[in-house]
């Protein structure tokens, strides 16, 4: 892993974590580093208070330090159970999304 990729991930985390903490626990299930575009596209899975288990896609533009929301899709609970076996990107003792703003 290059220093540039490590730096991009750290900057992504600065933007993504504060937004995603309301949905904790959150798992990164896919990540694509787009070095030529100075960006990272990544998918996270979490339990949404209105839609249940979702896979949400983001793009972090490292050059401009902007996090873009690219959409979400529901996932079956059976898939979520398998994902829960992994270490989360953002940990939480229990799922408590009641107070999240729902965005």
Image (tube, helix red, strand yellow):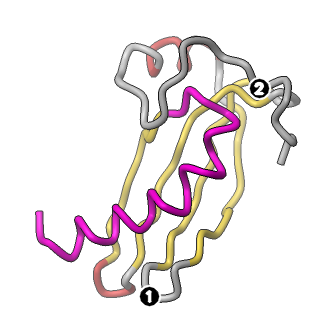
Q: Would residue 71 be found to the left or right of residue 83 on screen?
A: right
Q: Would residue 89 be found to the left or right of residue 24 on screen?
A: left
Q: Which is more N-terminal, label 2 or label 1? A: 1
Q: Would residue 71 be found to the left or right of residue 12 on screen?
A: right
User: Residue 68: horizontal and vertical position, in percent?
Assistant: 64, 69
**Around disc 2, counting alpha carbons within 10 Å, would you say few (fewer than 14), some (14 to 19), or many (20 or more)?**
some
Q: Which residue is mark 1?
A: 63
| Helix, strand or loop under label 1 | loop
The vertical placement of 55 against 13, above or below, is above
Say which quadrant the N terminus sits in: bottom left
The Cα–Cα distance between marks 1 and 2, rounded to whole angstroms, is 32 Å
Residue 46 lies in quadrant: top right
Residue at 47%, 55% in the rendered image = 42
25 drawn magenta = yes
Q: Main secondary structure of the magenta part?
A: helix
User: Residue 64: horizontal and vertical position, in percent?
Assistant: 52, 87
The residue lying toward the viewer, choosing from 33 and 49, is: 49
Specify the segment rendered in magenta.
Answer: 1-26
Q: Are marks 1 and 2 in contact (CB under 8 Å)?
A: no
Indicate which disc residue 97 carries. 2
User: Residue 75: horizontal and vertical position, in percent?
Assistant: 65, 28
The residue lying toward the viewer, choosing from 45 and 101, is: 101
Residue at 60%, 30% in the rendered image = 24
24 drawn magenta = yes
User: Residue 81: horizontal and vertical position, in percent?
Assistant: 52, 12
The vertical placement of 19 against 26, above or below, is below
Indicate which disc residue 36 carries. none
């Amino acid at each position: 892993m290059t220093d540039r990729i490590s730096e991009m991930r750290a900057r992504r985390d600065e933007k993504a974590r504060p937004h995603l903490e309301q949905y904790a626990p959150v798992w990164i299930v896919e990540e694509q580093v787009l070095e030529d575009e100075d960006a990272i596209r990544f998918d996270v899975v979490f339990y949404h208070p209105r839609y249940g288990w979702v896979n949400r896609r983001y793009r972090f533009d490292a050059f401009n330090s902007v996090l873009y929301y690219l959409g979400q899709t529901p996932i079956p609970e059976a898939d979520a159970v398998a994902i829960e076996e992994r270490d989360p990107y953002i940990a939480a003792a229990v799922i408590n999304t009641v107070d999240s703003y729902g965005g």
